[in-house]
């Protein structure tokens, strides 16, 4: 018996017992690295630490007075004034990372989806990465998304090129103030994505998404008045079924309102009823689209187009962008895609 205890003790020596003080801690933290490219900045008040010319000495001053935030939290980092390489370690894992390197009133921003414990920013922290982030934020905000929901998407290069040129032109202005710079960056990005659909702003990377299956969620959509103005926000329980065969898609929707709220104090004259319909559509890569028609029942809207539907994958499900096509009575469904996200059951 004594020998057995001694043997067990020997086996346990040097090992960790769950719950014991010697239990090893698994390090799941992330390291993010890249190169910092500071653009030419004419106004010394905007980037006083760097000065008028971004020479090596000026960059060294940038290193000495800059701070880095990752997902809104200040982190320690290293920044080599010779190679201009930065490195931030011990970052908490997340679906995506937003980095802001700030010096004085000026900042460079970058967005990166999680890709492992060792990550390198493709565009580093630069005017290009900053333009990319502003475009992501502008498009996401317009449809009530967060930028982290687009981890599988890349911003269209021509849009980034255009915004980089615009931002550099602003930085060349001697009298540019910090508040004006940030507002200009935001407004310029918003103008570039305005009235553009997803495929004009972003391209999805990775394998083609499969829509086969059943989906459900509680979502929001808008009802329009006879002038086409959104007057009612409708909360609804939605289910969707979907079957694909090559590029052909068939399925069904059930949309059951559970609550309503007036928009801009428009009166609610009647509550919406449950909507159920079957659909057939087409796949274009990872995007699903179809048009819903009114039933051929002899009514004024018989067999007329009611609304268009464009469905695309995001990190937490599939987003549904629906738009009214009925210009006679405005009976079609209108959505902001970020408020109409379905998840697989």
Image (tube, rainbow, N blue to C red):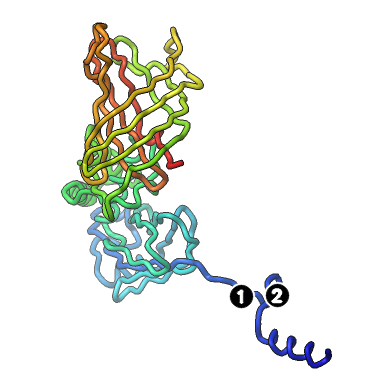
Report the residue at 34% width, 48% height from top: 150
Report the residue at 30% width, 37% height from top: 311
Q: Position of residue 175 (x, y in %)?
A: 25, 46
Report the residue at 74% width, 87% height from top: 9
Which quadrant of the figure has residue 70? bottom left
Please tell me whether residue 336 is drawn above or below residue 120 in the rendered image: above
Identify the image quadrant of the N terminus. bottom right
Q: Nearer the viewer, residue 61 or 110?
A: 110
| Residue that label 2 marks | 21
Q: Which mark is residue 24?
A: 1
Q: Position of residue 13 (x, y in %)?
A: 69, 87
Q: Which mark is residue 120?
A: none
Q: Nearer the viewer, residue 162 or 271?
A: 271
Q: Nearer the viewer, residue 143 or 256?
A: 256
Q: Position of residue 254 (x, y in %)?
A: 41, 26
Q: SS of the residue at dot 2?
A: loop
Report the residue at 24% width, 55% height from top: 128
Please tell me whether residue 250 is drawn above or below residue 146 in the rendered image: above
């Amino acid at each position: 018996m004594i020998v057995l205890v001694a043997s067990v003790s020997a086996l346990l020596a040097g090992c960790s017992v769950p719950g014991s003080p010697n239990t090893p801690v698994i390090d799941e933290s992330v390291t993010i690295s890249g190169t910092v490219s500071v653009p030419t900045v004419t106004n010394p008040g905007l980037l006083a630490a760097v000065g008028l010319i971004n020479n090596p000495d000026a960059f060294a001053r940038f290193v000495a007075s800059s701070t880095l935030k990752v997902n809104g939290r200040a982190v320690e980092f290293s920044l080599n004034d010779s190679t201009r390489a930065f490195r931030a370690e011990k970052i908490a894992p997340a679906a995506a990372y937003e980095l802001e390197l700030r010096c004085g009133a000026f900042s460079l921003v970058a967005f990166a989806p999680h890709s492992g414990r060792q990550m390198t920013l493709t565009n580093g922290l630069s005017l290009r990465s900053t333009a990319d982030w502003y475009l992501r934020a502008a498009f996401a905000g317009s449809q009530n998304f967060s930028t982290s929901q687009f981890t599988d998407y890349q911003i269209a290069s021509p849009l980034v090129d255009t915004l980089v040129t615009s931002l550099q032109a602003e930085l060349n202005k001697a009298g540019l103030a910090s508040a004006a710079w940030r507002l200009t960056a935001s407004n310029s990005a918003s103008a570039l994505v305005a009235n553009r659909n997803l495929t004009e702003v972003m391209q999805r990377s990775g394998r083609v998404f499969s829509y086969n299956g059943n989906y459900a969620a509680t979502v929001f959509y808008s009802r329009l008045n006879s002038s086409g103005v959104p007057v009612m926000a409708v909360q609804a329980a939605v289910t969707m079924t979907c079957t694909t065969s090559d590029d052909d898609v068939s399925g069904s929707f059930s949309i059951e309102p559970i609550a309503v709220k007036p928009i801009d104090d428009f009166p609610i004259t009647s509550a919406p009823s449950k909507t159920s319909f079957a659909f057939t559509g087409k796949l274009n890569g990872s995007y699903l689209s179809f048009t819903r028609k009114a039933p051929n029942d002899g009514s004024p809207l018989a067999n007329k187009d009611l609304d268009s539907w464009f469905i695309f994958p995001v990190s937490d499900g599939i987003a549904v962008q629906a738009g009214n096509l009925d210009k006679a009575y405005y009976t079609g469904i209108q959505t902001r895609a970020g408020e109409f996200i379905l998840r697989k059951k």
